[in-house]
Image: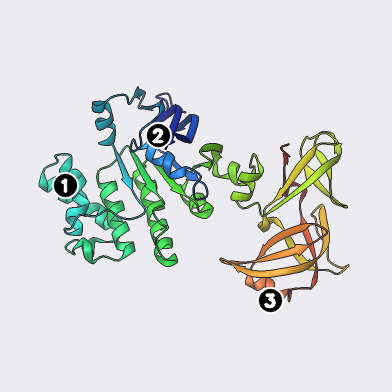
Amino acid sequence: MTAAGPLLQVKNIVVKRGGIPVLDIPDFRIERGEVLSLLGPNGSGKSTLLLTLSSLLKLHQGKLIFKGREIDGRRSELDYRRQIAVVFQDPLLLDTTVLDNVASGLKIRGMEKAGRLRIAAEYLERLGIAHLAKRSASKLSGGEAQRTSIARAFATRPAILYLDEPFSALDPPTREALISDLTRILRETDTTAAIATHDQMEAMRLSDRMAVIQQGKIAQAGSAEEVMNHPVNEFVASFVGMDTVLTGRVLENHNKHRMMIAVGDREIEAVGNFPPGEQVLCCIRPENVTLSTDSPEEHSSARNNFSGRIVRIAPHGLFYRVDLDCGFELISYITRISLDSLALREGRKVKASFKATAVHVIRKST
């Protein structure tokens, strides 16, 4: 935290819909200059939180504190809204030219014409749509329309930029190009931003910090590395891509560091400090599981080596997902080159290996 404190802080906020609480956040903050991802499945409350942070949803209780001052009245709320910008999943554009759309936020704020057109032209260039300046917004493709919407938001030079699922309606190539450009512009302009998304890969690429939302509450918040590799519970683990989550019981703990954990009739070595007898969950990311042909000549430095049978192979983005039966279910991601070089196929026996440090152990809730 800087000496000036967080840019935005919420205290004990509750939001209700139909009299039912849909958001309950005791304490949360957005730091100056950070890009924050609000991550969660559909219906988790991430968009509700984003709209609440942007003062577009009414609080049932609690308060928003912006730059150290509570947003507590109509004038204060209006001043806050003038310092932020919101980009929605579906672009909301005026029936005019692209240039006029990008300049519209500055016009509302009373900036003179020459100045607003100069700034609008700058952000058209940054978003790669300068050639569309005179085109009617009604003639744009989905990707072009979203770029126009984002350019309009940036043009106002907001203290906080809020984006609600801005890529979900776009096709993969268009989404990929826009994410790359948005990442670059956020860094170049040092813009503070909060992005609601259900896509963990989007969140990893864009954000400095993540907050995982579960049923209207923040299940975990922290750096991208912390959340992705050290989830606090089974929900977070499953959501951020710990595809293998195994229930086990601690058998031994050597020097409060290395543990042996019984998973069914198998034993897994892991790093941690749980006492013998503790019921735990062993979480393993699929990219940390190495596959090899099951031959005695093969050697691995990994502490966990299991023979298994391939149950299923399926494409998974740039990789292939391999489902294994090792006496417990285990998931691995491999490249096409590895798939071909190992001649892997469903039903084949292989050796699966992973390091003790690759096992994230959390206490199993009762």
- Residue 116 got which mark? 1
Q: Is residue 177 left or right of residue 93?
A: right
- Cβ atoms under marks 2 and 3 closer than 8 Å: no
Label 2: state its secondary structure: loop
Which residue type carries mark 2?
Answer: Arg
Q: Position of residue 137 (x, y in %)?
A: 22, 61
N-terminal of the two: label 1 or label 2? 2
N-terminal of the two: label 3 or label 1? 1
Q: Measure the alpha-carbon separation of dots 2 and 3.
A: 48 Å
Q: Residue at x 74, y 58 (%)?
A: 330
Q: Is residue 142 left or right of residue 175?
A: left
Q: Residue at x 83, y 68 (%)?
A: 294
Which picture quadrant has residue 148?
bottom left
Which residue type carries mark 1?
Answer: Arg
| Quadrant placement of the C terminus | top right
Q: Is residue 8 above or below residue 319?
A: above
Label 3: state its secondary structure: helix
Q: Is residue 27 left or right of residue 155?
A: right
Residue topped by disc 3: 340
N-terminal of the two: label 2 or label 3? 2
Residue topped by disc 2: 32
The residue lying toward the viewer, choosing from 297 and 183, is 183
